Amino acid sequence: MRVLVTGGAGFIGSHTVVELLEADHQVVVVDNLSNSSLVALERVAGICGRAPAFAKVDICDKAGLRQVFAEHRPEAVVHFAGLKAVGESVEKPLSYYQNNIAGTATLCEVMAEHGVRQLVFSSSATVYGDPETLPIREDAPLGATNPYGRTKLFIEEMLRDLHVADPSWRIAILRYFNPIGAHSSGRIGEDPQGIPSNLFPFITQVAIGRRDRLQVFGDDYPTADGTGVRDYIHVVDLALGHLKALERLAAGPGLVTCNLGTGQGYSVLEMVKSFERVSGRKVPYEIIARRPGDIAACYADPSMAQKELGWTTIRSLDEMCRDGWRWQEGNPKGYSETE
Ligand code: NAD
Ligand code: UFG
């Protein structure tokens, strides 16, 4: 299949492009490189033995998108492009609404113009807000607590409206839990700019010596050891979920909404322990106050994805730690230090 991947140079996008190429799909990546590097796509080519096509285009640029659609004639779109930093979204809400919501509307318009109506969209567990019950099912109440989360929620609503208006659209809304780890080659991985706000890249940067110690945000949550619990998912398992979603859309019309998580929650301290065991490195930490806006625990009921997509995760927390550490050890400064 000819697949257009927006945001394909980013963390999850680059891993998905590898799996698409390895499954013999033809791929064109559209990315404005606002949070990524072309080196990631060079590395993808190294892993796969062939490169995806690439267009440096912003998804808000309708003329640019039209040109890519005319040239590459995609049959389906996997849509990762978007801004994703919760804190930044509070400071710059308009950038988030413009980039994520207006960008997605523009993308869908250009898709419709070119008769492309198969779309896989990156949503997030953040649309569940502070969940009332665990594990979280797709029919749980929705409600985001920050501008980033609201962009995901509004885009979901927009896609549901689009599907009502024209049921020939085939849409998969995938709600990711906490993607971590890296490709087993150690050649591509997560490369956050500045101080990482997420737990896993912070841990790997402490282990490699870029930061002194981890700050654990609170140990007084109502969880087994008092620290926050999340559903960490290996980025390659997550990437494979997108291939399953494309197969599902090719099989018939409809709109499906699925959690992509393992169903298993781990606390911050459990993560630190697993990482130390697998990497052989110490991760010094100190407990500090809770981070505002954080929730105690969040993990998926992944049974809908199993039923609808025939997808389930196979990679363990140890593999997430091992692969994430291999990437960090081989690329201490991420993509900025190329050979
Ligand atoms: P990322 O920042 O690594 O990748 C996003 C890519 O989109 C980047 O390469 C960036 O340059 C590109 N981009 C951003 N705005 C663009 C625009 N207007 N036009 C073209 N390209 C643009 O992020 P990621 O972690 O790979 O996340 C991918 C998607 O998954 C995002 O939509 C994100 O919100 C969603 N998501 C991520 C997580 C997570 O924890 N990483 C969790 C849930 C959902
Ligand atoms: N944590 C620390 N120290 C850190 C970073 C995180 O103790 O330096 C803790 C957090 O308090 C939380 C856990 O580690 O308990 C995981 O935190 P992350 O920031 O890695 O992940 P979150 O679940 O808080 O947030 C992520 C994405 C959001 C998204 C949300 C729900 O970063 O964008 O998942 O999908 F909205």
Image: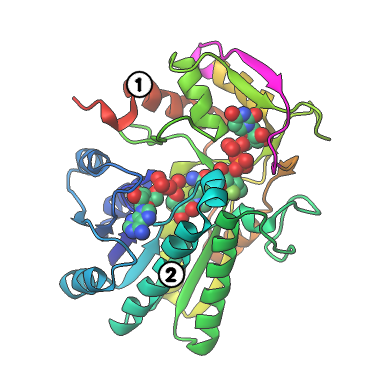
User: Mark 2 belongs to which amino acid?
Assistant: Ala
Density class for disc 2 (Cα within 10 Å; few <14, some 14-19, many ≥20) is some
Query: How many marks are shown on the rendered structure?
Result: 2
Rounded to the nearest angstrom, the CA distance separating label 2 from label 1 is 36 Å
Q: Nearer the viewer, mark 2 or mark 1?
A: 2
Residue stretch rendered in magenta on the structure: 278-294
Position of the C terminus, as image quadrant, is top left
User: Percent position (x, y) of residue 230?
Assistant: 66, 39
Quadrant hosting ligand 2: top right
Q: Please check the rendered image and state whether residue 292 is part of the magenta-colored stretch, yes or no.
A: yes
> What is the number of the mark on residue 102?
2
Note whether 315 is above or below 98 in the view shown: above
* Secondary structure of residue under mark 1: loop
Specify the farthest residue to the right: 222
The x, y position of residue 25, in whole percent, is 27, 60
Residue 93 is covered by the magenta coloring:
no
Residue, x 25% and y 57% (percent of image)?
24
- Residue 86, numbered label: none
Amino acid type of the residue tagged 1 in the rendering:
Pro
Badge 1: how crowded within 10 Å, few (<14), some, or many (20+)? some
Name the one closer to the observer, 321 or 1.
Answer: 321
